[in-house]
Amino acid sequence: MESREQITGSAADFDFLIGDWTIRNLRLKRRFAGCDDWDEFPATSRVRKLLQDTANLEEMDIPAKGFAGITLRLFNPRDGSWSLHWADSRSNRLFAPVIGRFDQDEGLFYGDDTDDGRPVRVRFLWEPCQHTPCWEQAFSRDGGETWETNWMMRFTRT
């Protein structure tokens, strides 16, 4: 008999995020420079389900920074993972996805990108909560040995 790893994860993993939000953003002013100075700015977002509830789309408005963005999150029922795809009005491109899953009380998602022309490993951390979810982005230049958190979002339901 073939052994199969139990699939964890559900198309409902991001249900905590469905709805309208105000967001407190904290973004590190300089990455990989030992900086502890954060830029704080507001945003709003709306998240809705798509594709027979196996995906969701977040539309984010960040007027203080002069841009808007979207995140498309797609659930893969074959392995229980999610792929998170970001695009914004500054770059006008779809960034490479981060892929991962929820386990216990957090979601961890990983991908590859560049920062100032240098390759970085990217980590998203989601802490789900019905009323005040949190998201953090961190970069690693050493393949994931060490991480620097460079962006945090604190969501409040509107």
Image: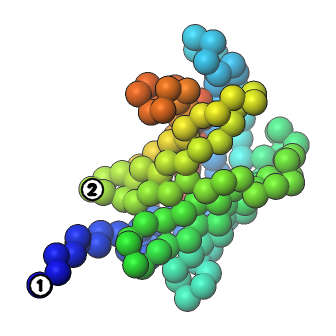
Residue 117 lies, with reference to residue 86, above or below; the image says above
Is the Cβ of the residue at disc 1 closer than 8 Å to that at disc 2?
no
Residue drawn where x is 69% and y is 19% of the image: 30
Residue 128 in view, yes or no? no
Q: Nearer the viewer, residue 82 or 28?
A: 82
Residue 5, x across and y down, in percent: 23, 70
Name the image quarter holding the C terminus.
bottom right
Q: Residue at x 44, y 33 (%)?
A: 144
Could you tell me residue 91's position as x and y percent?
85, 47
Which residue is identified by label 1?
A: 1
Q: Which mark is residue 63?
A: none
Q: Residues within 10 Å of mark 1 (few under 14, many from 20)?
A: few
Residue positioned most to the bottom? 52
- Residue position marked by numbered label 2 in the rendering: 104
User: Which quadrant of the view contains residue 103?
Assistant: bottom left
- Residue type highlighted by circle 1: Met
Q: Give the secondary structure at mark 1.
A: loop
Q: Is residue 22 left or right of residue 138?
A: right
* Colour approach in the figure: rainbow
Residue 41 appears in view: yes
In this rendering, the label closer to the viewer, 1 or 2: 1
Q: Nearer the viewer, residue 143 or 73?
A: 143
Vertical placement of residue 11 versus 113, above or below: below
Which residue of the protein is positioned furthest toward the top in this rendering? Answer: 34
Query: For the point 49% across and 48% down, which residue is it?
Result: 110
Residue at the limit of the structure toward the front, as seen here:
1
Q: Amino acid at mark 2?
A: Gln
Q: Position of residue 33 (x, y in %)?
A: 63, 12
